Image (spheres, rainbow, N blue to C red):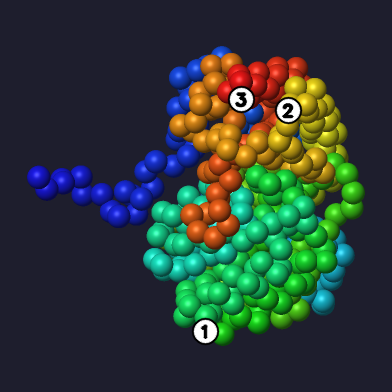
Amino acid sequence: MTSTSGLSQRAKMAGGQPISHLMHQALANPNLISLAAGFVDPATLPVELAGEAVAALLADPTEARRALQYGTNSGLAPLREALLERFHTADGTTPAETGLTLDNLVVTAGSNELLHLLADTLFDPGDIVLCGAPEYFVYLGVLGNLDVRAIGVAIDDQGMIPEALEAELARLDAAGELSRVKAIYITSYYSNPSTVTLSAARRPRIVALAERYSRAHRIYVIDDAAYRELRYAGDDTPSLRAYDSSGETVIVAQTFSKCFSPGIRVGYGILPRALVEPVLNQKGNIDFGAPNFTQHLIWNVIERGQLDAHVERLRASYRSKLAAMLDALEEHLGDIPGVSWRRPTGGLYVWLELPEGLAAGPASKLFGAAVAAGVLYVPGEYCFPREGVPVRRNSIRLSFGVQNEPGIARGIAALGRAIRDVLS
């Protein structure tokens, strides 16, 4: 019988995303303690700051009308100026050194819109993106939806391993597939899910490899810096863009979703000049300009010097919650042979590895036992590309973003009971 759905191939490929399964579990079990959702802590959302900014906007009728109108495709110019200044300050660079101007910066509806726009602009079906293994599973879904091949490259505690990246590029070159490689994607700060930060020593090496293998066309490095502000220990590290002397290789994706509010839907990209017009062409067909009112809102917060103080309050809250999760892991899982985890210095996650052979996937005994015990996690297998580094099915992503400290402790205790029950 002929199908009458009329759906595009892209729509069909979008089905069965991991996030749908996790949301179904959460809704079907409302009493679950979710250590899965990568949401920010509701208690830290800037209600007062947002209220003050909105009041200030609406107090001036002329400014209010500007904010309530459509915005430009590139984004609010004063906001872009402020963002570019903050970016140079964070990296310890100057416009003269980077060559960046306002033309390189595009405001989007969160960084995910930018990632979608880049994918539509750069990739054709069958193209290749090299990613860490594990890597951000929502982005892997974006690539899969476009029939783009994600190939996993090995990581360690310092991030993507340059030698492993070079070996994969050389393998693809020998196989005659180098021309299909379009980008290297890295969540470079406190990675979701692995929690690692790409070390300063490796950053110039990654950029240099992209440049060396850019033969048929430019291979871009996409630096997803969504978690950069959520640093709880140690010093900041310059972005990959700081090591791109030509300014033509690195794309930086940033967002206010983690450091201020996901609800305002404001993110931005710092793009090589050759990509600005193509990305804006795609963008203009989609949103007629990213949300304008909330761009004015966050610009107001920055102009009044309130964003940095808010970020410091966030760091204090999450630092305490991370400590609570690490303490609970030590108490409830520390004596189980074969269980290990990284101790992150930022972000919202802890990456947990279980004994070899103990599957943690959505159809596993452990996942069912954990739900029965009252806790939900993200199976780590969701975070591995289909090619490259083998999938580690004995892995789990835990988030401490949403739960309070007692909830974190109860959730980890429940997970510990589930693991022991399955192992026994």
Looking at the rendered structure, the kind of residue marked 2 is Ile
The residue that label 1 is drawn on is: 216
Q: Residues within 10 Å of mark 3 (few under 14, many from 20)?
A: few
Q: Is residue 207 visible?
A: yes
User: Residue 91 appears at what percent x and percent y?
Assistant: 83, 63
The tag on residue 38 is: none
User: Residue 284 appears at what percent x and percent y?
Assistant: 47, 62
* Of labels 1 and 2, the one closer to you: 2
The residue at the point 71 percent across, 81 percent down is: 246
157 on left or right of 280: right
Say if 420 sits above or below 73 in the image.
above
Q: Quadrant of the N terminus?
A: top left
The residue that label 3 is drawn on is: 423
The residue at the point 65 percent across, 59 percent down is: 154
User: Residue 157 appears at what percent x and percent y?
Assistant: 77, 52
Farthest-out residue, right: 234
From mark 1 to mark 3, how far is it between C-alphas? 51 Å
Say if 73 sits above or below 212 in the image.
above
Total labels: the figure holds: 3
Q: Give the mark nearer the N terminus: 1 vs 3.
A: 1
From mark 2 to mark 3, how far is it between C-alphas? 10 Å
Farthest-out residue, left: 1
Q: Residues within 10 Å of mark 2 (few under 14, many from 20)?
A: some
Using the rendered view, name the quadrant where residue 340 is placed: top right
Looking at the rendered structure, the kind of residue marked 1 is Ala
The residue at the point 82 percent across, 63 percent down is: 200
Farthest-out residue, bottom: 215
Contact check, label 2 and label 3, Cβ < 8 Å: yes
The residue that label 2 is drawn on is: 336
